[in-house]
Image (cartoon, rainbow, N blue to C red):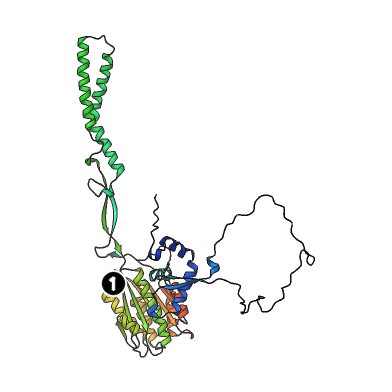
Amino acid sequence: MAYIVDRRLNSKNKSLVNRERFLKRYQKQIRRAVSDAVSRRNITDMEQGESITIPKRDISEPVFRHGQGGKREIVHTGNKEFVEGDRIQRPPGGGGGGGSGSGDASSGGEGMDDFVFQISQKEFLEYLFEDLALPNMVKRQLLSMDSFDFHRAGVSEVGNPSQINIVRSMRSAHARRIALRGKDRRRRREILAELEALSLLETTDEVEEQRALLKVELGHLNVKIHAIPWLDDFDLKYNLKVKMPRPSPKAVMFCVMDVSGSMTQDIKDTAKRFFFLLYLFLKKNYEKIEVVFIRHHTQAQEVDEETFFYARETGGTVVSSALNLMGNIIEERYSPNQWNIYVAQASDGDNWHEDNQHCHDALVSSILPFVQYYTYIEIGDRDPQGLWYLYEHLQRDFVDRFAIQRVRNNAEIYPVFRELFRKHAGEEVG
């Protein structure tokens, strides 16, 4: 096996290999910085790069020096004040640091600046969504004919030179040479045996004539045998690879956000932060996925991305309107037999009390039996509301496909997001 290391310099004469090694070494500090950036950034700045600060002590490296070897005799000066075990008092001086300078002393002993470097947008998103995946993704059917995998299908007489099968080609050449030269090689052995027998006889004109004829025939046979090529175009065999349509997962994500009057601006901003993270995650990791945005107060609407994140419409609270709209969209456009269906819902938990039963009926009859994964986050620092208790009850019945979390502020969004979409064994991104 051969390893190729690309040591070409990228921009600003920096080695890409060394940079990747550096990022791998300080993953812990980078992950912490990325997590902090998510909680303090505006939504529009979420996918930009980030400055990473690493304390100087974290990047120090061990240094090897040559010590004084051999056998040495050293005389250490003594003293009249101390013996072994005495504690030395602090020397007299002004200021907390005991120095003679005119500036104020620092209580920290660090004398070096922190190391700061920049990670790109791509690197930021890689760390942001590391080890995350949509749960329970199933490859249900073949998508468009532009998705293929190549599979080995034996050997072929024609093909690309890069796909030549050396073992099969040499085996074919060897078999061809044996087949074409077998008769002539047997005849040559017979001639050599006859010539050896004639050399034992007494030399006469008849023996000399017979020996001459055999040598002429032997010469023709040698020319004929050596004229057979060692490798012919007929011998070449190529690895045959055929294109097979690749089963790809068809997935849709429903983003459902409460925009009622009980949702304060801070709560709405926190919900939008969660959905923007989700949108970036889907856009980065999944090529073939559709996103349906639903906003609701007393009425629910399917909206586009711009309206979902930036519209200011508000009103009362009827959560069942959003669930009924989602059920209708699933029935009309996203057959559960063909699509992986995911739902992410964010709310402050307030709902019209009589509407909770309608929510329960809609979820049990037309949504939860058909979705791969349903997530709900309740935002706010109040006690759990009526919607939370309803979903908590449903989670016990659909434990493998229902997840609920509480979020109090922006700082908790990213940890909760990672917990909801943490990759489990066997799960893949699309």
- Please identify the quarter of the rendering in which residue 340 is found: bottom left
The relative height of residue 284 versus residue 40 in the rendered view (above or below) is: above
Kind of residue at disc 1: Ser
Q: Nearer the viewer, residue 76 or 164?
A: 76
Image side of residue 209 versus residue 268, left or right: left
Horizontal and vertical percent for residue 212? 21, 17
**Which residue is identified by label 1?**
335
Task: Label 1, secondary structure: give it.
Answer: loop
List the single residue furthest toward the right. Answer: 80
Q: Nearer the viewer, residue 171 or 195?
A: 195
Tell me which residue sits at (29%, 80%) in the image: 304
- Is residue 175 in view? yes
Horizontal and vertical percent for residue 308? 33, 82
* Residues packed near mark 1 inside 10 Å, few (<14), some (14 to 19) or many (20 plus): few
The relative height of residue 375 versus residue 182 in the rendered view (above or below) is: below
The relative height of residue 10 versus residue 213 in the rendered view (above or below) is: below
- Is residue 368 in view? no
Horizontal and vertical percent for residue 251? 32, 70
Q: Nearer the viewer, residue 48 or 396?
A: 48
- Please identify the quarter of the rendering in which residue 376 is found: bottom left
Tell me which residue sits at (77%, 62%) in the image: 78
- Please identify the quarter of the rendering in which residue 369 is found: bottom left
Q: How many marks?
A: 1
Tell me which residue sits at (29%, 55%) in the image: 150
Image quarter of the C terminus: bottom left
Horizontal and vertical percent for residue 111? 58, 71
